[in-house]
Amino acid sequence: MPHDWDDPAHWWNAACRTLQSRTGTVVVLHDIENASVKNFLNLLDGLEKLGVDIVQSFPEEVVLICDGEPMSLKPGHVARRI
């Protein structure tokens, strides 16, 4: 996470630096007032300059639930009805 809530004006720089040094990174942004939205286009421009591909799929290890079934959730994190 690029800490978009901590530094609303410059979070996208942190995101681009992280993505430049790692492959297969999932970016998490927060849809809160005065955070990611104002500089989202800066992020997209930065990613384009870096040649980063944006995909709409996630690695299996970050998908917790799919079609109502636990995927990478640990059994102790799943609530059970009694």
Image (spheres, rainbow, N blue to C red):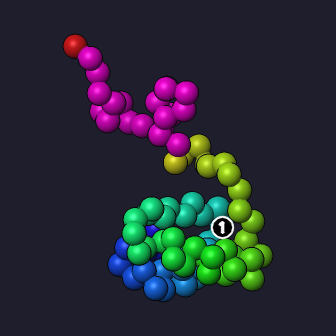
Q: Can the viewer see residue 43 in this picture?
A: yes
Query: Which of these two is toward me, 44 or 51?
Result: 44
Where does the image place residue 14, in percent across and percent down from the top left? 51, 81
Tag 1 secondary structure = loop
Residue 9 shown in magenta: no
Q: Can the viewer see residue 21 in this picture?
A: no
Residue 2 lies, with reference to residue 63, above or below; the image says below
How many numbered dots are placed on residues in this image?
1
Query: Which of these two is toward me, 38 or 66?
Result: 38
The residue identified by callout 1 is 23
Where does the image place residue 53, in percent across and percent down from the top left? 75, 65
Residue interval drawn in magenta = 63-81
Where does the image place residue 75, in percent across and percent down from the top left? 35, 30
Give, as a three-letter code, the residue at label 1: Thr
Q: Residue furthest top?
A: 82
Q: Identify the residue at horizontal 71%, vertical 56% (top origin).
A: 55
